[in-house]
Amino acid sequence: MAAPWSARTTARGSRQRNPRRALCSGVRRDRASTAIGLCLALGGPPAVALACQDLRTPPVVTLLVGQAGLIALAAAVLYPGRPRQDVPWAALGVRVPGPGTILGALALAAVYMWIASPLAYGLLRLAGTSDFSAGLARLAVIPVWARAIAVLVAGVVEELLYRGYAIERLTWLTGRRWLAGALATLLFSAAHVPLWGVPASASLLIAGTIGTAVYLWRRDLVLNLIAHVITDAAGLLLLARSAS
């Protein structure tokens, strides 16, 4: 049975008299949804990596299961139908790549390979700590085609979650892009601990800081994504040559 007209009018008037309460309630729901998305984006990849370490499957199967987990994680975070979390692609810096994007990606990949990587290895040697050898040894037993899939999936998913989504949503929460970039970079580095260990993952702060600075400057996620994939693919090629 419908409510009397006077009761409906009173309820409507009550809602109209409390727009601030409705706004605050909406903001709280937005913040809660964003917090859930950030927990998935920032904590999901290392959780997937740790879960895969417990699998009793051949290495290639374990790797492919991990990549499928990353894809599912990205879909869960970025799915536009998730309640109160419709983040358009343009807001994540995703755009149609032009000549500037391609040239910038090549330049950034060159910085990664010829400045950031040698500097990271040099610091690890000076500190007398472990480098990437243990992780590379685990990857060396995996077929090249499977490693190529991992390079593509990891490059795309990590940039989408840690660079695009995390920085933009943390900026919305904190109001400070530099703080959002710093937090995302720290957690990006920490996400690699299950594969590379603590010292090697800490050295990734160098490349991570450079990549974040470029993203904050250009806000072109496709540029970062291409540079990431090129750099990892170059490492894959070197690993394949050393194994042959």
Image (cartoon, rainbow, N blue to C red):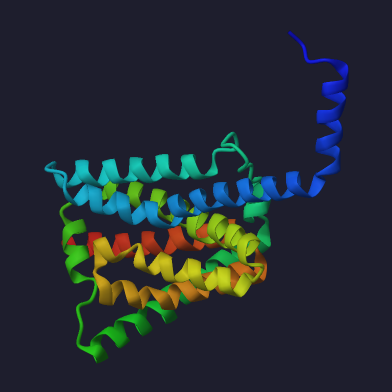
Question: Dividing the image into 4 quarters, which one contains the C terminus?
Answer: bottom left
Residue 157's x, y, as percent?
45, 51
In the rendered structure, the answer to whether residue 23 lies left or right of residue 53 reads: right
Does residue 145 sit above or below 11 in this rendering? below
In the rendered structure, the answer to whether residue 90 lies left or right of residue 156 reads: right
Residue nearer the viewer, 194 or 157: 194
Does residue 207 sit above or below 58 in this rendering? below
In the rendered structure, the answer to whether residue 13 lies left or right of residue 208 reads: right
Does residue 5 sit above or below 150 in this rendering? above
- Residue 107 visible? The answer is no
Q: Which residue is drawn at 78% across and 15% down?
A: 3
Question: Dividing the image into 4 quarters, which one contains the N terminus?
Answer: top right
Residue 31's x, y, as percent?
60, 52
Please identify the quarter of the rendering in which residue 239 is found.
Answer: bottom left
Residue nearer the viewer, 226 or 186: 186
Q: Residue at x 16, y 48 (%)?
A: 54
- Residue 138 visible? The answer is yes
Residue nearer the viewer, 196 or 97: 196
Please identify the quarter of the rendering in which residue 215 is found.
Answer: bottom right
Residue nearer the viewer, 145 or 153: 153
Q: Going by the picture, which residue comes out furthest to the bottom? A: 126
Residue 188's x, y, as percent?
42, 65
In the rendered structure, the answer to whether residue 226 lies left or right of residue 84 reads: left
Does residue 93 sit above or below 78 in this rendering? below
Number of labelled discs?
0
Residue 139's x, y, as percent?
21, 57
Q: Residue at x 32, y 71 (%)?
A: 201
